[in-house]
């Protein structure tokens, strides 16, 4: 088995949806890690059962390619996580000179729908002009729903963003509805979905900086590092000051007590300067917010402990 390549492990993980970590790269660090590999898998499996519903995980040590997935064939509703691929598309359009970060975007009162929106809170009457870079920050860092839908309009609609993202990350992701459309019916949110590994692929692509210019790559990473939502998720149990470039996503809870999505995806900077891309998606859970967010934090902590200890 030690002769199986990292890519082969990744392909198997994608096909069967079972967590796999490539052994050749792991063998250099596992004896120093806090959790032995088998114990680590058992602990992750137990933690993933806590919120009920379905928990999807995809993790990659970006410098070695070590990869782990769980429930990778399930279609997880993204909710606001889709603001990350949207911002990726917007930055691509900036690189193509079709948009500019400094261009002013006019926002009318009719653009400010009754939804979660720090822009609406600050400018309830609208009739303002904001630079594109500020709209991106509102959408990604603050998860503003109105800013998101204005960006979709500038991008040419969800279909254009979907086509671009599938081209660079694969077909196991769908962006079909904007925030306003998702708000109209519970079922609509499930039309915006991804598998954990596909979202991981997009994070890896961002980290590698091959699809965007250096300036656009830096801007998007910095904007994700400034995310203020979900402090108890990926960042919840990591050492204070750990740099995490991430995007959260959260649904409402229906009258049956089911929360469709509690998500966090991002890139964690390890103590030695290396990086861990991590996707944790909790879908259709009957558990409390504390349990759902705690599940994400616990999973991130396990991988942090493994690679932080192993990298010393």
Image (cartoon, rainbow, N blue to C red):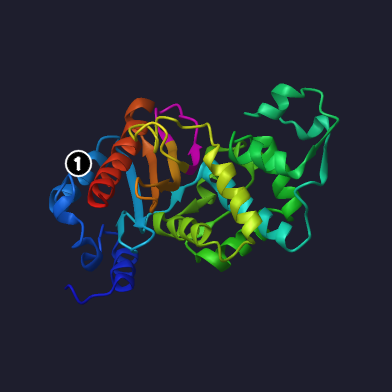
Res 8 visible:
yes
Up-down: is 135 above or below 209? above
| Residue pictured at 21% horizontal, 65% vertical | 23
Q: Nearer the viewer, residue 60 or 15?
A: 60
Does 57 appear above or below 13?
above
Give the left or right position of residue 110, taking residue 263 as reference.
right
Q: Position of residue 274 (x, y in %)?
A: 38, 53
| The one of 294 and 235 positioned closer to us in this rendering | 235
Residue 257 highlighted magenta (yes or no): yes
| Near-viewer residue (189 or 139) | 139
Q: Quadrant of residue 124?
A: top right
Q: Secondary structure at mark 1?
A: helix
Give above or below for 28 relative to 279.
below
First to last magenta residue range: 245-259
Residue 73 within the segment the image draws in magenta: no
Specify the quadrant that holds the N terminus.
Answer: bottom left
Residue 96 placement: quadrant: bottom right
| Residue designated by label 1 | 46
The mark tally for this picture is 1
The residue under the point 72% across, 26% down is 120
Question: Does residue 28 appear to the left or right of 263 in the view shown?
Answer: left
The percent position of residue 216, horizontal first and vertical second, equals 65, 55
Q: Quadrant of residue 22?
A: bottom left
Residue 265 x/y as whole percent? 45, 46
Residue 109 percent coordinates (x, y): 82, 29
Q: Is residue 286 visible?
A: no
Looking at this view, is 129 or 121 the one in front? 129
């Amino acid at each position: 088995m030690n002769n199986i390549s990292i890519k082969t492990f990744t392909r198997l993980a994608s096909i069967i949806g079972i967590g796999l970590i490539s052994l050749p790269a792991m063998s250099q660090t596992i004896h120093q890690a806090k959790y032995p590999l088998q114990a680590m898998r058992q602990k992750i499996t137990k933690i993933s059962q806590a919120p009920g519903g379905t928990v999807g995980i995809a993790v990659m040590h970006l410098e070695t390619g070590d990869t782990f997935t769980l429930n990778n064939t399930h279609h997880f509703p993204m909710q606001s996580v889709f603001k990350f691929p949207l911002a990726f598309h917007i930055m691509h359009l900036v690189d193509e000179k079709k948009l500019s970060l400094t261009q002013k975007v006019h926002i009318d009162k009719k653009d400010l729908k009754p939804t979660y929106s720090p822009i609406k809170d600050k400018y309830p009457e609208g009739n303002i002009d904001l630079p594109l870079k500020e709209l991106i920050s509102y959408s990604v860092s603050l998860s503003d729903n109105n800013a998101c839908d204005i960006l979709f309009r500038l991008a040419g609609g969800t279909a254009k963003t979907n086509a671009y993202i599938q081209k660079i990350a694969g077909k196991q992701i769908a962006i079909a509805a904007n925030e306003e459309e998702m708000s109209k019916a519970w079922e609509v949110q499930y039309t915006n979905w991804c598998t954990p590994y596909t979202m991981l692929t997009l994070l890896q692509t961002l980290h590698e900086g091959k699809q965007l210019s250096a300036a656009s790559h830096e801007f998007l990473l910095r904007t994700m590092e400034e995310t203020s939502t979900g402090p108890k998720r990926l960042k919840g149990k990591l050492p204070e000051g750990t740099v995490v470039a991430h995007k959260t996503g959260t649904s409402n809870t229906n009258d049956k007590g089911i929360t469709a999505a509690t998500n966090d995806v991002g890139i964690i900077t390890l103590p030695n300067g290396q990086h861990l891309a991590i996707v944790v998606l909790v879908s259709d859970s009957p558990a409390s917010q504390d349990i759902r967010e705690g599940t994400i934090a616990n999973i991130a902590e396990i991988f942090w402990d493994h690679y932080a200890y192993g990298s010393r």
